[in-house]
Image (spheres, rainbow, N blue to C red):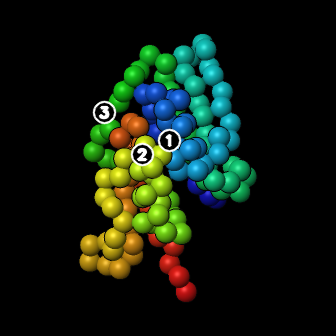
Amino acid sequence: MRILHTMLRVGNLEKSLTFYTQVLGMKLLRRKDYPDGKFTLAFVGYQDEASGTALELTHNWDTPAYNLGEGFGHIAIEVDDAYQACENTKKLGGKVTREAGPMKHGTTIIAFVEDPDGYKIEFIQKKTA
């Protein structure tokens, strides 16, 4: 068994696709409109779905925004350099909500950014041997 994908409902699919592909560097793996249901599914990720986990962005055409709720935490992405990832995010118009630095009570270097809908993405700096 393995995790296939995580689904997020997004208010503006094009803004979200721009964020995940241009700011975070993911690839659009597949996209399909469902006119009868008035929704679109777009899958993004760093690897093809046979090799890695994807993020499913669900856009319900009649819903411009969602209440994020209190149960969702964040999506974690491993990066080579969390400081540089934050700089790149800002240069590309993304929002950094916690600059890179050691996690509280630990040494792992982390940072947080938000996508256009306010979902939190954690950058975790890859540990060196």
| Residue corresponding to mark 1 | 19
Residue type at the position of mark 1 = Phe
As measured in the structure, the alpha-carbon distance from the residue carrying label 2 to the one carrying label 3 is: 20 Å
Residue type at the position of mark 2 = Gly
Residue 15 coordinates in the image, percent (x, y): 49, 32
Is 57 placed above or below 27 here? above
Rendered-image quadrant of the C terminus: bottom right
Rendered-image quadrant of the N terminus: bottom right
As measured in the structure, the alpha-carbon distance from the residue carrying label 3 to the one carrying label 1 is: 19 Å
- Residue 94 is labelled as 2
| Circles 2 and 3 in contact, beta carbons < 8 Å | no
From the viewer's perspective, is 42 left or right of 107? right
| Circles 1 and 2 in contact, beta carbons < 8 Å | yes
Residue 39 coordinates in the image, percent (x, y): 54, 22
Residue type at the position of mark 3 = Asn
> Which image quarter: residue 115?
top left
